[in-house]
Image (cartoon, grey):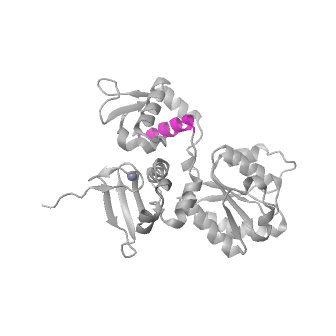
Amino acid sequence: MTEARVQTCPICKLSGDQIVRENAGDFGRLIRIKCPRCKEFIISHFTEITAQDSLFGPKLSAWIRSRNEQHAEIPQINNDRLKDIQAGLPNYSPREKQIKLLQNIERKTEYPGKAVQIVPEYDIPLAWASTQEEFLYYIESLIERGLLRITGKDHQINGLIFPVAITADGWDYLEQHERHIEERTQAFVAMSFSKDLKPIWEGPIFRAIEKGGYKPFRVDAEPHSDRIDVKIISEIKNSRFIVADVTEQKRGVYFEAGYALGLGLPVIWCVRRDDLENVHFDTRQYNHIVWETMEDLENQLYNFICAIIGKGKEV
Ligand SMILES: [Zn+2]
């Protein structure tokens, strides 16, 4: 009889025989991991042994889990991508974490009234929480707010698993709320409207976004003033992420990117190499795609989208 090997998930450190490791190709250099907390991902063996542990942890686990919950492509983690993924990880407030959790429970609900089984040990990432204690706090908060109820016999949170259901108020609340960011398919493009840069929009930016599985969107003309108009605001709100090419240093581009950041949307910054030194001081801290040719921009942008946002299902 063979003994079940006890494995540990490199990302969330859960260990036990429920963690599955499989060879995922490249002569054993890629490993597929199935973890009940993170779900499924592929990691390079090199990254697993060399990456600093601080790069792993609950947030990365939540990111991997959210990719799985959306049935997107299985996330691949290697040294090149890890830093970019890390830089794009959101900092959710307690309020946002409660919303995420409620939306995740909604996604798992077969029909209103049907209970969803919660396993705190494994479901921590559904609330982007760091610990079970934090996770249970959000569950309790949702119950106190009347958005969620326990449906088990004794109506208490106890044991390793308990059933919850979204209340009528909870459904109202979800409906009032924005569409799930993960389900949005549009990518908003903020850039200069000059003739010089038009081919950049029509060629590499458009193609990279489309290839990445999203719908590229750009407003047709420069706004008349520096004020962001209603149309732009609603299109940004309706987007999954934004691409901000700051070449030519237009104020509107910075406004739109800033607005998106305020909404918690990922922003992919780009700039042509000869304009890099002019990039606004406040945004230099962000990683920029620095491009020289159209082909270069297309490749870098496509890789960024796949690594940070994850491939969409649009195309
Ligand atoms: Zn894990």
Residue 197, image x and y in percent?
Answer: 79, 67
- Residue 100 in the magenta stretch? The answer is yes
Residue 106, image x and y in percent?
Answer: 46, 38
Determine which quarter of the picture holds residue 269.
Answer: bottom right
The residue drawn where x is 45% and y is 65% is 50
Residue 151, image x and y in percent?
Answer: 35, 28
Q: Is residue 305 visible?
A: yes
Residue 196, image x and y in percent?
Answer: 82, 69
Q: Magenta segment, which residues?
A: 93-108
Q: Is residue 214 left or right of residue 218?
A: left
**Quadrant location, the N terminus:** bottom left
Helix, strand or loop: magenta stretch = helix
The residue drawn where x is 82% and y is 59% is 249
The residue drawn where x is 59% and y is 55% is 87
Q: Is residue 93 left or right of residue 263?
A: left
**Quadrant location, the C terminus:** bottom right
Q: Is residue 135 left or right of residue 234?
A: left
- Decide: is 226 above or below 299: above
The residue furthest left is 1
Pick whichever, 275 or 221, lies toward us: 275
The residue furthest right is 224
- Residue 234 in the magenta stretch? The answer is no
Determine which quarter of the picture holds residue 179.
Answer: top right
Q: Is residue 314 visible?
A: no
The residue drawn where x is 35% and y is 49% is 14
Pick whichever, 134 or 38, lies toward us: 134
